[in-house]
Amino acid sequence: MACSASTCRSNCYKDQPDEHDSDTNSVANRNISNGLCLKCKTNPPISSSADDSRFCSDCFRANLFGKFRFAVTSNAMISPSDNVLLAFSGGPSSRVALEFVHEMHSKAQKNFDASRDRSLPVFGVGVAFIDEASVYSSPSNELYKAIQEITAIVEELAPPAKQLYVVPIESVYSSECGDGRERLKRLLDAVTDPTGKEDFLLHLRMLALQKIALENGYNRILLGSCISRIACHVITATVKGQGYSLPADIQYVDSRWEIPVLLPLRDCLAQELNMLCRLEGCGSLKTVELIRSPRTGINGLVSSFVSLLQEENPSRECTIVRTAGKLIPFHFNRIQEIDDSNVPLATRRRQKRYNLKPNECFSSESFCFICNGPLSKSDLLSLRNLDQCQTSPDTFGAACCSSCRFQILPQDPSLLDQFSADLPQQLVARAKLDNLDNYLMLREQIQDCLLSEGEDET
């Protein structure tokens, strides 16, 4: 072992590696050379090409599930009294999320059945699929087949059973509006920017998930967003000028919505999730391929760019997300503290330990009525000359962030009237409420600079 004395000048063992490190490396290299799993050291690894393939199929799955479970438990995402709605698209990420949630759900049910008093409830799980046939021109028979496959995937899961909701995206309009599909088509056609149209569709999808959760008694929405997708979002948000609201989108928990949104796969790579779905040793997870238009604009360019970076260096995506993770999160990037006797004391203590600490400087309560992103001070200053109760179409531009203002809202005033008329009622109500809240907040910020009625300007 090398000498650690700072005053020693004999250079004793200076160039020799540490014995413990060399022994550990030799054992690892011996296991790899012998064709054994790096963890269990008994089963053969998946392959010999990537770092993750140094594990056998069982250890590889256990490693991914450990990341998922740690994210859920350390951030207190799910408590026994919760009802979780999982957004399912049929892709590898949402398929793995469904499998892992089902495993935790089954274990909780077994513990409940084995307990004597059965005082600790079991959290509920539902699955939601947003039908976007009105947006993408795909054959009806292929969509019907995809929905049948998704239904079969959910029904083939072992008990406890999970309710599946297949809801069209035009459901964001109230049932009283019989022309929801036509209004949605006019709304999307009014957005000429390809990137803005993709982003607006993403916001409408979240709005549909929120509506499903509210109408069916769910208090959590779980997404399958992985680190690869978050890395792309970090760069696209930077390019679009959404740096202020970026910390809100990349955390494990997002409670700015009426129903909090969870990202338990935040530490998993897309490559890992794809590999898990193809593993035969763990029982291959069936996915559903949906025919959709290729991504264009900024989103498509950034996705291709990040893919090239990942090919050159497999740690690029992790580096991007880890760097963005140094940004201070908002106060709503945490689950509210639990004060429920049904929740174990260990869960409550863990929540207090791991919950992100809010920063008063980032505690903006004003949000863009389209993307629900926090508004910066420069966005709030645009409301300076607005009346308190003004709700004309011109105020929609002042009630949203700069990115949505330039990429989603029509620039032609004549088109803006029709665009505002075709907006879902939830967005219109949010815009009116935010206009009032922003006006009051701005007035509170400049209260010291205002003159009273009896004071003279001079």
Image (cartoon, rainbow, N blue to C red):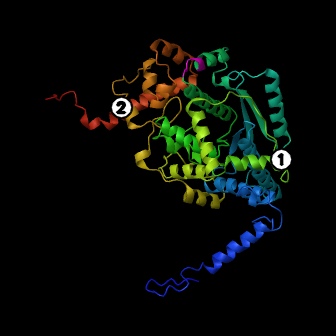
Position of the N terminus by quadrant: bottom right
95 versus 48 height, above or below: above
Q: Give the CA separation, mark 1 to mark 2.
A: 54 Å
One can see residue 262 in this view = no
- Considering depth in this image, is 294 or 399 the residue closer to the camera? 294
The amino acid on which the numbered mark 1 sits, given as a three-letter code, is: Ser
- Please tell me which residue is depicted at 82% across the width and 58% down the height of the picture: 114
Residue 61 point in image, percent of width and height: 76, 55
The tally of labels here is 2
Residue 238 point in image, percent of width and height: 49, 40
Asked if residue 385 lies left or right of residue 109, the reply is: left
416 versus 82 height, above or below: above
- Considering depth in this image, is 109 or 51 the residue closer to the camera? 51
Residue 150 point in image, percent of width and height: 80, 35
| Residue tagged 1 | 284
- Considering depth in this image, is 137 or 376 the residue closer to the camera? 137
Q: Which mark is residue 164?
A: none
Please identify the dominant SS of the magenta region: loop
The local crowd at label 1, few if under 14, some if 14 to 19, many if 20 or more residues have their Cα within 10 Å, is few
Q: Quadrant of residue 53?
A: bottom right
Asked if residue 259 lies left or right of residue 368, the reply is: right
One can see residue 356 in this view = yes
Q: Which mark is residue 381?
A: 2
Does 190 lie within the magenta span?
A: yes
